[in-house]
Image (tube, helix red, strand yellow):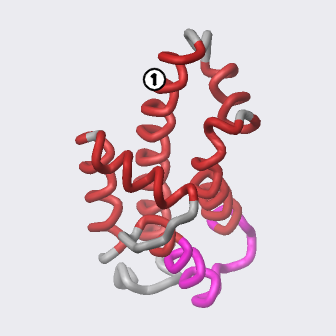
Amino acid sequence: MTAPTDPTDLDHLDRLRVHLMRVHQALLQNERRRYERLHGRVDDGFALLQLAAHDPWFAWLRPMAQLIVQFDERLEQDEPLTPADGRLLVDELRALVAPTGETDDFHVQYREALQASPEVVMLHGALVRELNG
């Protein structure tokens, strides 16, 4: 078994993906509640998916969704994951969720979500613990 810090450790990368998906789901549900307060009820999961993909309200979440897709694609490819590919995924994840002074929409909204939601804080903490191996 490889060490968790090994960039080709597929189990570690899959655990990171699962944690990332949990954080994204919590953020999406928080945004759904905020959106519904102003715009009315979102009828179902398909309607929420359409909003998440196309509505400007949810645009800030797209970098996280795109990173989840990158994890999925790299983990499902037939050829072995290279150390460089594994490091790239981990580095992109770290840049996305690590506390920084970044002022782009994602980081500003993410910091606000961490301040507003104990659930997001707990899920973020679990993700960071896995990230730090």
Measured from the top left, where is residue 96 in percent x and y? 50, 67
Residue 78 horizontal/vertical position (percent): 74, 69
Q: In the rendered view, would you say 26 is above or below 15?
A: above
Reply above or below: 77 against 124. below
Q: Residues within 10 Å of mark 1 (few under 14, many from 20)?
A: some
SS at mark 1 in the image: helix
Q: Is 63 located above or below residue 34 in the figure?
A: below
Which range is magenta? 75-92
Q: What residue appears at the point 35 percent right and 60 percent down from the top-left corner?
A: 127
Residue depicted at 59% across the width and 15% down the height:
39
Q: Does residue 9 appear to the left or right of 125 in the view shown? A: right
Q: Is residue 38 above or below residue 8?
A: above
- Looking at the picture, how far across and down is residue 62, in whole percent? 64, 50
User: Which is more toward the observer, 7 or 40?
Assistant: 40
- Whether 86 is among the magenta residues is yes
Give the side of residue 59 with respect to residue 115, left or right: right
Give residue 68's quadrant in the image: bottom right
Instruction: Give the residue type that dot 1 points to.
Output: Arg
Q: Residue at x 27, y 67 (%)?
A: 129
Of 5 and 30, nearer the camera is 30
- Inspect the magenta stretch and tell me whether residue 69 lies in it: no
**Residue highlighted by disc 1:** 33
x and y, in percent, of residue 84 in the image: 62, 89
Picture quarter with the C terminus: bottom left
Residue 111 horizontal side relative to residue 13, left or right: left
Instruction: Write down the quadrant of residue 4 in the picture.
Output: bottom left
